[in-house]
Image (spheres, rainbow, N blue to C red):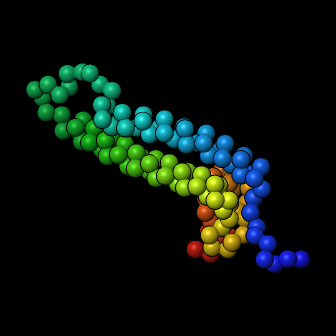
């Protein structure tokens, strides 16, 4: 039994993961655009901003909503960046290899979290 053989997913498996990642990235980019448009425009064309009455609670709520959307956008951008990095690992044929243990990450885990770089074993060691 050779010990110097590199463990990695087959090209067919990598192609499957690539399709999955591209689908997730397309959806993530659409979601990001929705978040950004909600943050930038708030989808209202009303006269709320011209109303002479002071609406502290509504303004506070709107500010919190914009902050929440901003945080969502940041998380979504990170998710997209992680997916792009996963595509690079597929091209390098290092995708699915745990960066701590060097073992293959479970295929089911990669289907759920396609940008994972740690196996469950490595995640549990972090705790």
Question: Residue at left 67%, top 42%?
Answer: 19
Q: Residue furthest left?
A: 52
> Looking at this view, is 91 or 55 the one in front?
91
Q: Residue furthest front?
A: 92
Above/below status of 33 relative to 47: below
Q: Residue furthest top?
A: 46
> Looking at this view, is 23 or 87 the one in front?
87
Location of residue 20 by image quarter: top right
* Residue 58 x %, y %: 24, 35
Which quadrant does the N terminus fall into? bottom right
* Residue 67 x %, y %: 31, 46
Question: Residue at left 48%, top 39%?
Answer: 29
Residue 6 seen in render: yes
Location of residue 39 by image quarter: top left
Left or right: where does residue 90 sit relative to residue 6?
left
Which quadrant does the C terminus fall into? bottom right
Left or right: where does residue 95 sit relative to residue 67?
right
> Looking at this view, is 62 or 73 the one in front?
73
Question: Residue at left 36%, top 33%?
Answer: 37
* Residue 71 x %, y %: 38, 49
Residue 95 seen in render: no
Above/below status of 33 relative to 81: above
Picture mark count: 0
Above/below status of 14 relative to 97: above
């Amino acid at each position: 039994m050779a010990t110097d053989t590199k463990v990695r997913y087959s090209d067919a498996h990598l192609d499957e993961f690539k399709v999955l990642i591209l689908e997730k990235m397309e959806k993530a980019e659409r979601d990001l655009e929705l978040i950004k448009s909600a943050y930038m425009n708030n989808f209202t064309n009303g006269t709320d901003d011209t109303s002479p009455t002071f609406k502290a609670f509504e303004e506070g709520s709107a500010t919190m909503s914009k902050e929440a959307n901003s945080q969502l956008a940041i998380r979504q951008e990170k998710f997209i960046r992680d997916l792009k990095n996963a595509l690079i690992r597929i091209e390098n044929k290092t995708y699915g290899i745990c960066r701590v243990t060097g073992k293959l990450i479970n295929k089911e885990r990669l289907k759920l979290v396609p940008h994972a770089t740690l196996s469950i074993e490595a995640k549990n060691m972090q705790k």
